[in-house]
Amino acid sequence: MENTRYIIEIATSDFSTTNSAVEGGADRIELCANLAEGGTTPSYGTVQFCREKFAIQLFPIIRPRGGDFLYTEEEFEIMLSDVKLFKQLGCDGIVIGMLNADGTIDIKRNGLLVEAAYPMRITFHRAFDRCKEPFEAMKQLIQIGCERILTSGQQPAAPEGVGLIAALNEAAEGRIIIMPGSGVRADNIKMLAAKTGCIEFHSSLRGKENSRMEFIHPAFVNSAESYSNNAIHPEDVRALRDALNNEC
């Protein structure tokens, strides 16, 4: 696989982390808010500014809240509105995921989001890892027009789900992209590529950096929430690429 063109997608949480991911050589951005909750829909202003500043592929997540992936009709209407707004901003794609209460794919409403998003491309996020029948779910997502599935192989992290990821990638037969994500790091991405045959990988590389605030209120001196910010280091993004390029 010496000539394989690997794709690195980085999940970012704001303009600063997006800027760092782009500097590090990411191929695509999954733009989110609240990554600690698994990612929620970023603000219109954040998406607009990132779209204006970066030529990179930009895929905002469409998720109105944290928690499960069973949405009310009102929440669906919010999602539909966000899809239309991000389409107007010229985003390259969106990231979606809706389930039924029984653990099956919500085919109807996911399909409506796909239709509304066209010609933007569609990634189905890790709601897939909570579905009941992954191979049936994959067939359904192909049918409604999704381009890729982000998955950890129905385990908390991709290295633990490597067997299912490999089986999904084989069964996909090129009809949909299987993209491992969750826990993907420079020290395991080569293994994931070798064992799954996947060529796209997703990582958040989440870190923290100290606030530049000069005044620290004594009542909040130990509050990480008050005096640290999300951070991505460009060299960590480059390390993912280097690990793949050094594959034997």
Image: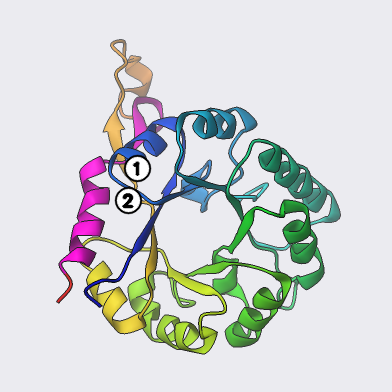
- Location of residue 129 (image quadrant): bottom right
Magenta extent = 224-246
Q: Which residue is mark 2?
A: 205
Query: Relative to 209, does residue 100 appear above or below in the rendering?
Result: below
Residue 54 versus residue 151: which sits nearer the camera?
54
Residue 190 versus residue 103: which sits nearer the camera?
190
Which quadrant: the C terminus?
Answer: bottom left
Q: Amino acid at mark 2?
A: Leu
What's the residue at 28%, 33% (across, down)? 209
Q: Which residue is mark 1?
A: 21
What's the residue at 70%, 69% (across, down)? 99
Report the side of 122 relative to 203 (left or right).
Answer: right
Q: Which mark is residue 125?
A: none
Report the side of 7 relative to 143 (left or right).
Answer: left
Q: Is residue 81 visible?
A: yes
Q: Position of residue 28 (x, y in %)?
A: 44, 51
Query: Relative to 45, does residue 4 appear above or below in the rendering?
Result: below
Q: Is residue 198 magenta?
A: no
How many labels were placed on the picture? Answer: 2
Q: Secondary structure beneath disc 2?
A: loop
Report the side of 232 relative to 100 (left or right).
Answer: left
Q: Could you give the CA–CA distance between mark 1 and mark 2, rounded to whole angstroms?
A: 9 Å
Q: Is residue 71 visible?
A: no
Do the residues bearing badges 1 and 2 touch, measured as CB atoms within 8 Å?
A: yes
